[in-house]
Structures are given as structure tokens and as C-alpha cells.
Amino acid sequence: MKFLKSFYIHNIFFRYLGCLAACFVVSYWIKVLYPIAWVLFLLLVGLFFFDILLLYGLGKGIQARRKLPLKLSNSDANPIKIEFEAYYPFKTYISIVDELPKQFQKRDFDYKNTLIKGEKKQFKYTVRPVDRGEYVFGNLIVFASSPLRILKRKFAIQKDQMVPVYPSIIQMQQYDFLAISNRLSMLGLKKIRRIGHTQEFEQIKEYVQGDDVRTLNWKATAKQNQLMVNQYQDEKSQPVYSIIDTGRVMKMPFNDLKLLDYAINSCLAFSNIALKRNDKTGLIGFSKAINSYVPALQKPTHLNTILEQLYNIDTSFTDSDFGVLYSHIKRKINQRSLLLLYTNFEHISSLKRQLPYFLALAKKHVLVVVFFKNSELEKLISTDVEDLQSIYHKTIAEKFSFEKVLMQKELQKYGIQTILTKPEELTINTINKYLEIKARGLL
């Protein structure tokens, strides 16, 4: 039974049969070809059984291995490596089929190569998941053929390997590296001039040329009989919370990725940057109720806690209750904090319904409301139109796009910080806003 499951006829064998059949047909008119056709037929039968002996005479003919990372990164190109080696004493023709997870809906995977005895080779391909969760890779299947290429032997290796897809770890590491090397501007992050100084006192020191004269400490100057100044340092360990709306408004997809996943990827990269800058980071996920809460902390392992929480967040088809969010923040967060609220509004009326909660939050905290431009509408607006129906569609698109700007102005009128961004630019704009708030000493 095992033999039959691994036994396949090569496509070239059918070409041999076609030529043999043609020879028999032609022999009807050319009699001398008839015995030749029978000789060829017996030769083909002999080669058929000889090919079986070649492929199945050696138990361990092909060895292959799929090497998966411990975690896949959502929305990124993740490399998968396959290594293979031949033990046959002849040149082997192989075809590799990797059974990819059902989420990719890819059924045409086929890689071909040749191997000689003892030769090791490898190749890489990439996968781009667009949903978090468990992805199960099926069999790694290798079809091996001898130089005769009459038969194929199937090797099924590494069945059912599961790998979880987490928020964009690759994107986080990219920003992390550039933050350490101080080259964040390469990704479009702005260098923001620091305004004034922060209020965290460090020490009193002697005045040297270049110190800010506004920081002179006259009492210390009188005691020491020389100019003394207060030295300040950047305020650290300030609480920063990423608040993610998991309601139906975040279900909208752009470039195969939901708005929620853009927010989650941004939250992870942003939280990593904030931790590197010695701030405390936390997380809140809410819809009809608070479905995840991580208090703001500043310790090396805290990012893993946030990552695990982000992995389990999902959208629902309900409208979010901002009153529940306000009550939770009022009860749990007593210290003045930076609140980055990832949500979305398509109509100014829906924003005005939530405005009282935003104003209440902004009284005690620095609130930044993050919502999204509709990329599809932007494409429609930039398209040249000629017929009446297209003009109508473009006019409606411009109306919706203008409403987004009105929403931003409405929030800014009450002193609430905003980020209106395209989904693909969310992470850059979020980190820029964080750097701006820290530079201006608003927190």
C-alpha cells in the first residue's frame, strides 16, 4: 500500500507511449515497422521495471527539510528555507511541492532541480500573511525521477508544521535598529527641535559658557560665590498607552490588511521605540467592553507581554462603547499619560457622538486620536473622469475626503491632538507624533 501511494508515472512516459502508438499505426502501411514497434514496446516494458528498481532499490533516496521561523510576521515577506539532499547513485531529477497553509490559497507551488549523489542544495521562498493566528504547513512533498524519467517516486516529509503569525515583528525590528543607530529619518521620521526644557531636575552644577542663563540658581550662586545652574534631564518613565478600537469600524481592509492589523503593527513598533526611550508603555483594547488591558510598565520583558496581547486581539461587528473606555481609564489610570487612540470615523456625526468622552479624557491626559484616510477614495479623486456617472462618484468621494479634514479640525479646535493618515503610513506618523509631543514637553 505504501508503495502504491508513492508510485507515479512521469509525464515523459506518456510521450514514449505516444511515439510507440504512432509506430504501430504507421506499421499498418509500412510492414517493416511492425516488428520494430514490438521490440520498442518490450524495451519500454523492461525500462519501466528497471526504473522501479532504480527508484525503490534504495530506501533513503531523498532527504529534505523545511526550516520555518518560530514566528511569522504579519503583513511582511517572511523567508522560508527548504534544504534537500540526494542519496541515489545517479543524477536525480526532483520536483518539490510545499503544501502551504490554507490562508494563502496558493496551489501552484512547484520547484524543480537536479541532484547528484551526496549533493546538498537549498532554496528560499517568501510568504506574506495578512491575518494573525495559527498557520499549518502540510506535507513537504518531493518527487524523484531517474535519468530515464519513466516513473516518479513520492517522498512525503514533515507533515503538519504549525507556526503562529504575530504582529509585524520585522517592522518593529526595522524601526528598533534605526532608532539605535539614530537614523530614523531614513524611514521618514522627522527630527523635531526641542522646545524649552523638561521639568525633571538632575543636579546643580557650575555655569559654563553655553548653558541656558534662565536656569541660573541664585541661592546656590550666593552660597558658592560663583554662577551655578540647575541641570535638567529628559523626563523618563512617563506612561504611554496604545488604545485600540476593536469594533466594526476597524474591520475595513486596505491592501489585504484590516485597519486593526495596521493599528496593531504600529502599536508594536511604537511601544518598542517608547521603551527604548525609557517611557512606560501599556495597552488597552476595547469594543463593547474592555477585552485587553496591560498596565504601563518599563522593563525589558514588557514588550513580550504586549506582543502576546496584540496576538489575541480581534475585531468584532459591534459598535464600540467609548463610555466603557472612559470609565476604565478613569478608574485604572491615575497618572497623566499619553493616550494614543486608534479608531476610525467615516462621518462627522459619528465623531460628534463621541466628542464628550474625548474632551473628558483630554482634561487629564494627552489624547491623540488616530484615524484613517480612505486610500480607495484618494485613488478615485485623483482619477480623470469624463462621463456623468464617474463625475458623480468622484464628487461623493471628495465630499467624504473633505469630511475627514473637518473631523481633524473639529478635534484640534478643542486642543485634542490628531493623526489623519493613510494606513500604510500609520507607524511613521505615530512615532513622529510621539517624538513631537516629547520634544514640546506636552506630557
Image (tube, rainbow, N blue to C red):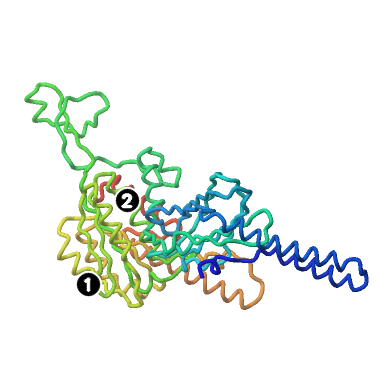
Location of residue 62 in the rendering, given as x and y in whole percent from the top left corner: 53, 53
How crowded pointer 1 is (Cα within 10 Å; few <14, some 14-19, many 20+) is rated as some
* Label placed on residue 285: none
Residue at the outermost left position: 223
Q: In this view, does 209 lie above or below 175?
A: above
Rendering quarter of residue 365: bottom left
**Would you say 210 lies left or right of 347 here?**
left
| Label 2 residue SS | helix
Mark 2 or mark 1, which is nearer the start of the sequence? Answer: 1
> Which residue, given by chain and number where applicable, does mark 1 sit on?
324
Residue depicted at x 25% and y 63%: 284
Q: Residue furthest top?
A: 225
How packed mark 2 is, by other alpha carbons closer than 10 Å (few <14, some 14-19, many 20 or more), is some
Residue nearest the viewer, comparing 170 with 340: 170
Residue 84 appears left or right of 235: right
Q: In which quarter of the image is residue 323?
A: bottom left
* Front one among 143 and 406: 143
Give the quarter of the image for residue 380.
bottom right
- Residue 434's disc number: 2
Report how far apart the C-alphas of labels 1 and 2 lie in the structure: 25 Å
Residue 326's x, y, as percent?
21, 68
Secondary-structure class at tag 1: helix
Q: Do the residues labelled 1 and 2 touch (CB within 8 Å)?
A: no
Q: Which amino acid does label 2 sit on?
A: Tyr
Q: Position of residue 210 (x, y in %)?
A: 27, 27
Residue located 22% across and 53% down the image: 239
Left or right placement of residue 334 versus residue 43 in this view: left
For badge 1, the amino acid type reads Val
Image coordinates of residue 25 in percent, x first then y, are 86, 72
